[in-house]
Image (cartoon, grey):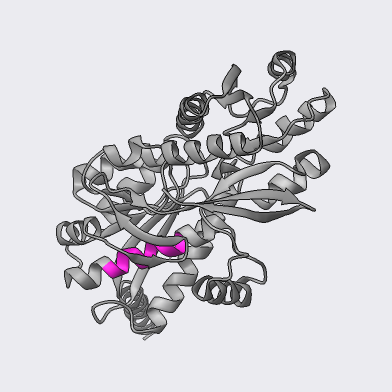
Amino acid sequence: MKYFFTQAVALVLALTFASCSKKQEIGIPVGQFASLTGAQATFGQSTDKGVQLALEEINSAGGVLGQPIRLITKDNQSKPGETSTAVRELITRDKVVALIGEVASGRSLEAAPIAQRNGIPMISPASTNEKVTETGDHIFRVCFIDPFQGTVCAKFARKLGATKAAVLVDVSKDYSLGLAKSFKKEFEAEGGTITGQQSYSGGDKDFSAQLTAIKGANPEVVFLPAYYTEAPLIIRQARQLGITVPFIGGDGWDSPELAQVGGAAVEGCYFSNHFSNQSNDPKVMAFVQSYRKKYGDDPDAMVALGYDALYLLVDAMKRAGTTDPAKVTAAIASTMDFPGITGKITLDEHRNPTKPAVMLQIKNGKFSFMESVSP
């Protein structure tokens, strides 16, 4: 009797787990890979919050094509090599029909060939290095690219009255190298002079040698295409060495940690970005209010880009009338005037969006809107 009772319990449990498993698998499988932990964790956490907010809204409104979106997220821990493992699992084991990710250009470049080989559309929220979408016709992004961002920063530096600029670049990051190249080209085209370029590698802590060389060249502005993990440390050391000129950076500065770690040293510095939560656009204002209600604080640009990435994917699925990856890819490629939170998005023949950038200044620990710059 005890044997049959035990077997009956086991059967009930097995059926229960099978039912739960089946229930969990309902919906259109979409993969997300992000740096939720590790050195660039705030990037991944922010994009994930944006994706999650969009997911909640989309599924509450009935999903897409009569089904909810089932998001499957993998953490690459901000480490080289982890992204390829995560993306292979999402494609081969989880059978996702599309991918959202990454912020860091290096990790998107790691993932893109895998997505391309498997015919799975991949949308990067915020990888700005131009090489990312050059991987193939299944790779897209919702952010502007480095040549545009670098141009915006160079023009802004000249608008500040700077005629001489130094550049400090992270040679371990594709993102930093790409931005430095485009900044230098445009700054010189605008009649400015590059007084010199110094380099470091991500993870370094002592920048005194590079900053001493920069100080000796007497620039009027320093372009620092770094991530928020190094930028505030570099600028603090620069101030200690007596460098008082403004620093200008790219969207890699966009994290609360920039002001928290940099403190007074980063006050008055500038950076380019994809979005300002101070916008008076009704659509942006509604988005900011929804985010505040869900998370209790203000969204940054990575949040907005994650939000736009999922909504653009869903828009393409609706236009394709299917979740077939090949047809969804074609629909994404034909995107025109998509009303994103970060601006109206039209994808060009290289699968890059034509959209504006904003320049922000750090004032009293906050990121204050300066101006919007269109292509």
Q: Residue 136 in the image: x percent, y percent?
A: 23, 41
Left of 28 or right of it: where is 149? right
Query: Which quadrant of the figure has residue 252?
Result: top right
Is residue 37 visible in the rendered image? The answer is: no
Q: Is residue 206 above or below residue 73?
A: above
**Picture coordinates of residue 237 (x, y %)?**
78, 28
Would residue 262 be counted in the magenta stretch?
no
Q: Using the image as rendered, state which of residue 146 and residue 293 is in the foreground.
A: 146
**Count of picture labels:** 0
Inspect the magenta stretch and tell me whether residue 313 lies in it.
yes
Residue 232 appears in the picture as rendered? yes
Q: Nearer the viewer, residue 195 or 191?
A: 191
Q: What x and y, as percent, mark residue 1?
A: 36, 86
Q: Nearer the viewer, residue 184 or 132?
A: 184
Q: Main secondary structure of the magenta part?
A: helix
Query: Which residue corresponds to the image point at 71% horizontal and 22% vertical from the top-left?
Result: 207
Direction from residue 17 to residue 98 in the image, left or right: left
Numbered range of the magenta stretch: 306-315
**Residue 305, horizontal then vertical, whole percent:** 46, 58
With 66 as the anchor, is 282 left or right in this view? right
The answer to which quarter of the image holds residue 24 is bottom left
Choose between 267 and 46: the one closer to the eye: 267
Q: Residue at x 20, y 42 (%)?
A: 117
The structure residue drawn at horizontal position 21% and vertical position 59%, both measured from the top left corner, is 334
Among the 4 quarters of the image, the one containing residue 64? bottom left
Residue at x 67% of width, y 72% of height: 296
